[in-house]
Image (cartoon, rainbow, N blue to C red):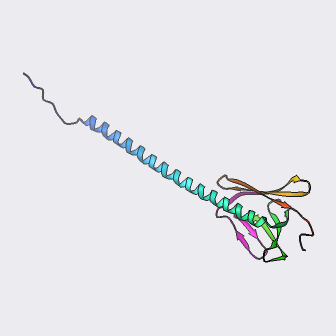
Amino acid sequence: MKTKNIEHGFTFVEILVGLVIALLVAGALISFTRLSFDSHLTISNTMEEIWDSRQTMNLISEELRYAVQADLTADKKSIVFSTLDPSNYENVIQYRLFLNADNYLCIDNGLDVKVITKYPVKALNCEYNKKDPLNKTIDITIEFSDQTTLTTSVIALNDPKLTKN
């Protein structure tokens, strides 16, 4: 009976093929991990910007809730509105909502200018919307840099009996 001598070693070609496959698998894993990490960062930043945009609109809505008069500037890039002073309803406070030179949304109460967004804003549009013939409604649309667009409205009563000059 003749026995065959079986070698248990690998040839050079088999080792080379194994190394190529191992490198391809390692490259795919690294690429997948990097893509997942980048996607996570993008989603985190987007969620933070969406949260900031919601907080901004809540702040604007809170300020506009007591508006007794509102009007657009000639360039329709900002809105000027008057509210009653919560500490003394005899006084009227003038506000202006606008974008500064760096495209951050700001509110000016005559004493100081406060930046109310953490991120730049793409666009601020204010326009009249005549839903009711008795009241003029001003729609304020803010397009944030993460493609979120939010709109709020203020009814521009413009009643001279409600405001003091």
Question: Whole-percent x and y of residue 85?
Answer: 80, 74
Give the extent of the magenta segment.
101-124
Is 104 inside the magenta-drawn segment?
A: yes
Q: Quadrant of residue 55?
A: bottom right
Is 50 inside the magenta-drawn segment?
A: no
Front residue of this view, candidates 131 and 120: 131
Q: Let me know if residue 103 appears in the view.
A: no
Residue drawn at the location 49% of the way across and 49% of the way down: 36
**94 with respect to 106 (left or right):** right
Residue drawn at the location 71% of the way across and 60% of the way down: 57
Q: Quadrant of the C terminus?
A: bottom right
Q: Quadrant of the N terminus?
A: top left
Question: Whole-percent x and y of residue 9?
Answer: 19, 36
Residue 129, compared with residue 119, is above or below; it is above
Q: Quadrant of residue 59?
A: bottom right
Q: Let me know if residue 4 appears in the view.
A: yes
